[in-house]
Amino acid sequence: MKLLVYLGHPAHFHLFRFVIRRMRENGHEVSILARKKDVLEELLREEGWEFQNVSPRLRSENIFGMVGAMIGRQRAIFREAIRNRPDLMIGTSAEIGHVGRLLGIRSIVVNEDDADVVPLFANLAYPFCNHILAPGCCRMGRWAYKTVFYESYHELAYLHPNFFKPDREVVEEFHRSDEPYFIVRFAQLSAHHDNGRKGIAGKTARDLIELLASKGTVYITSERKLEPEFEKYRISLDASKIHHALAFATLYVGDSQTMAAEAAVLGTPSLRFNDFVQEISYLNELENRYGLTYGIATGEPKRLFRLVEKYANREIKKEWARRREAMLDEKVDLATYLVRFLQNYPQSVTAFDETPEEKSPTGGELKQLPVIE
């Protein structure tokens, strides 16, 4: 099989990392297209993978710039598809569906956001792709008929214990103290579906950092430009190693959805503070079914600080480890699932079975776990 993978965000590199490795090991030809976004190119180079950049210039954030950038990416993908003639294209973007429809190449869009949370993306992408892959908890609305649901999360394609083993030596590269440390993430919140949404900023950010600093060491990872007063907290660690840091952290706090979920599946208490609270199904499931992450609306900073006081405690992680085991016992190793799905596509759409090796070796009785306040 000749597979074309399009990566539009650093999170997508992690999502497809082991899928690409295994597909190549199994004799398939995989070409990679990537857009300039945060540390995505850095991650690809560290992996030693050849890739084609489909957006060499950073886009403008106004609507005309976004449309122009999308057209530019479509052209680049079109040229690569004409040159390489893949049997199948997969990614998290609308562009692959458009190009696939024009050239008669099958395309699969992978997404973990509910269709009603990203309506513009859904309307641009879903009518043109052949199939959608999404977690079983997602609301896909009128696109459910072409969605293949699986019992997992994107984060379990690279943080499942079948693939990821936290390395404490990585932590020693930046944290040589015995005191607890905390990871804080500031997201850009500039995507079309983020319009008007708020996160951690201003006085809330200053008060949060001050509170955490009184309890241990604070490390900030930021997608947006940091205020000068926060620069001293910036973590000095390669992007490829951040998940090791997250696994051993006492607490994660941020306005990023993805990193909140990553902390959750690693068993690190996770607090997310933004205006998406209670809107996104997979985060709601991690919160309400497994008790691994909690969302706080931006109008409730006092609740955020109260939960920080509660969870900035190393002993809490013992309980989170049990909760994580309960979650893993019900979810599959997504990378293995995707490889098997792709290798058997399109028959896999109607005849796909989760096999025991995709299950976690850990177990645990599932409970409904409410927030501890």
Image (tube, rainbow, N blue to C red):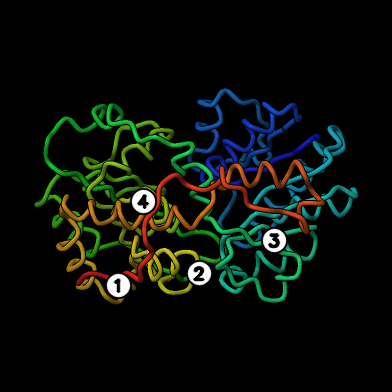
Task: Check whether the beta carbons of the residues at disc 1 and disc 4 lie within 8 A of each other.
Answer: no
User: Where does the image place residue 329, in percent across and percent down from the top left?
Assistant: 45, 54
- Which residue has dot 4 on it? 263
Q: Earlier in the sequence, mark 3 or mark 1?
A: 3
Task: Check whether the beta carbons of the residues at disc 2 and disc 1 lie within 8 A of each other.
Answer: no
Residue 31 relative to residue 21: left or right: right
Q: Earlier in the sequence, mark 1 or mark 4?
A: 4
Residue 226 relative to residue 100: left or right: left
Which residue is situated farthest in the top direction here?
Answer: 48
> How far apart in space, not on screen, are marks 2 and 4 (Cα)?
17 Å
Q: Earlier in the sequence, mark 2 or mark 4?
A: 4
- Which residue has dot 3 on it? 148
> How far apart in space, not on screen, are marks 2 and 3 (Cα)?
16 Å
Residue type, numbered disc 2? Ser
Q: Secondary structure at mark 2?
A: helix
Residue type, numbered disc 3? Val
What is the number of callouts on the image? 4
The structure residue drawn at horizontal position 17% and vertical position 30%, both measured from the top left corner, is 176
Residue type, numbered disc 1? Pro
